[in-house]
Amino acid sequence: MNYLVTGLVCSGKSTLLDIAKNYNFRTYKSDEIVSSLYKDEHIVTILKNIIGIKQTSENFKDDIRDYFFKSIKNKEEIEDIVHPIVHERISDIFSKGDKTMIELPPIIRNQFLFEKYNTIYVVAPEKARRERYNTNNKNDIDIFDQLNSIQNDYEIIKKSCNIILENRDSPCCLDQYFNEGIIKT
């Protein structure tokens, strides 16, 4: 069975994907799909010339992130270009076989995918998510707050998910969902 895996930033989605590999799932992260697009010359040209993102650093992805967080308009401009391609790639990945998990953020533009495919929503308390983010991304807690605010439609997304998993801050707890057959392998 194929699944989309979603949940707020640092809820345990990546940990669930790591566990899924032990059950012979192929795993993908939407961030990796997006990162590959930022290396595609056609996409880079669109972002630079049509939207007008200026490359000011060695890593163009940092410039895109800065532009993205400056305004809702900027965010929507980037999403209008990137999301249709990401959605197409997700559909393509799922069409090629079973036992695949793809992580995807809980934003409203992804809602139709959450309704179309089997979806797992990983829940974790904000305090634990904030601590996890701070541990992995020292001195960059502002990014956590920005990401958290973008994912403000999560309750709508959560309601459309087939499986809700509670991450009690232990990989064993997430593994239990496979062992109990809640996640079909």
Image: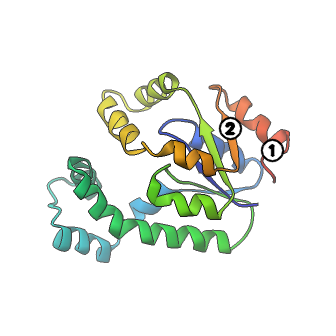
Quarter holding the C terminus is bottom right
> Which of the pair 95/154 is nearer the observer?
154
Q: Earlier in the sequence, mark 1 or mark 2?
A: 2
Instruction: Write the residue at 66% across / 74% down.
Output: 95
Q: CA distance from mark 1 to mark 2?
A: 9 Å
> Which of the pair 131/70 is nearer the observer?
70
Position in image of residue 90 (x %, y %): 56, 67
Q: Residue beneath label 2, please?
A: 165
Count of numbered marks? 2
Position in image of residue 115 (x %, y %): 62, 60
Instruction: Write the residue at 46% across / 55% down.
Output: 108
Left/right placement of residue 104 relative to residue 49 reads right
Quarter holding the N terminus is bottom right
Residue 59 visible, this angle? no
Instruction: Write the residue at 36% across / 39% down.
Output: 149
Q: Is residue 88 above or below residue 53?
A: below
Q: Amino acid at mark 2?
A: Leu
Left/right placement of residue 142 relative to residue 135 reads left
Residue at disc 1, secondary structure:
loop
Position in image of residue 114 (x %, y %): 59, 58
Q: Is residue 40 above or below residue 159?
A: below
Q: Which mark is residue 182?
A: 1
* Disc 1 and disc 2 in contact, CB within 8 angstroms: yes
Instruction: Write the residue at 55% across / 63% down.
Output: 112
